């Protein structure tokens, strides 16, 4: 049983109901906006704190970054120096051959052009791996083949090579006359060992 009757018009009742619902949902909406605002403010503060900390860490680690850049530059320099060292090693093994050519030119000038080297075979002078292999077989050295107008020029070449101190052994392997006429050429072959 009902103890009360609502005599208010239906339109007024709808307005009251609407007002009550707006008030209820307004409070819920305001609470939601307040919570979102608080969360947003907390996120802004956290972002600001993290940004300040990041700036501080960047300033603290700036010397480390500079050191890292210097380390990278040093590694590049080290790589370049290693390449230069390889070139220097290669040139070091080519030096005996260049010295030998200079020595032969000097001795050739002393003979007055009466001697010519036609073939020059180097064994074990150019590369260390070749030198090591050849040392076990028979050492490093040079085999000279050429022509001369007389035996004195060949003897001068042999003694010049021996006196240079560059070789431990200089040996005349062959000296033959080419042709039977007087003043004909002589073919020679010298072996020089280090």
Image (tube, grey):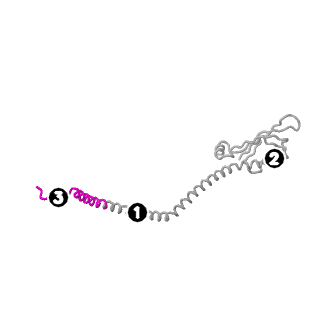
Bin the neighbour count of mark 3 within 10 Å (Cα to Cα): few under 14, some 14-19, many 20 and up.
few
Q: Which residues are magenta?
A: 1-30
Residue toward you, 130 or 51: 51
Residue 19 magenta-drawn? yes
How many numbered marks appear? Answer: 3
Q: Is residue 169 left or right of residue 25?
A: right
In space, the residues marked 2 and 3 are separated at their CA atoms by 141 Å
**Which residue is the site of mark 2?**
108
Residue 44: assigned label:
1
Residue 189 magenta-drawn? no
Residue at (29, 60) in percent of width and height: 26
Which mark sits nearer the N-terminus, 2 or 3? 3
Which residue is the extreme one toward the right?
Answer: 182
Q: Closer to the observer: label 2 or label 3? A: 3
Residue at (62, 54) in percent of width and height: 80
Secondary-structure class at tag 1: helix
Question: Does 119 sit above or below residue 48?
Answer: above
Quadrant of the rendered structure where residue 144 is? top right
Residue 7: assigned label:
3
């Amino acid at each position: 049983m009902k103890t009360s009757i609502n005599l208010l018009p239906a339109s007024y009742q709808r307005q009251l109901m609407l007002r009550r619902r707006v008030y209820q949902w307004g409070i819920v909406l305001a609470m939601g906006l307040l919570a979102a605002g608080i969360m947003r403010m907390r996120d802004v503060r956290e972002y600001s704190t993290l940004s300040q900390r990041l700036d501080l860490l960047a300033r603290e680690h700036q010397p480390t970054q500079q050191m890292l850049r210097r380390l990278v530059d040093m590694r590049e320099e080290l790589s370049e120096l290693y390449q230069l060292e390889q070139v220097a090693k290669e040139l070091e093994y080519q030096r005996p051959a260049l010295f030998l050519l200079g020595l032969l030119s000097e001795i050739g000038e002393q003979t007055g052009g009466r001697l010519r080297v036609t073939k020059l075979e180097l064994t074990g002078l150019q590369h260390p791996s070749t030198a090591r292999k050849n040392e076990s077989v028979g050492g490093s050295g040079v085999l000279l083949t050429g022509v001369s107008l007389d035996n004195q020029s060949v003897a001068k070449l042999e003694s010049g090579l021996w006196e240079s101190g560059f070789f431990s052994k200089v040996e005349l392997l062959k000296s033959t006359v080419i042709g039977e006429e007087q003043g004909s050429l002589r073919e020679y072959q010298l072996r020089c060992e280090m």
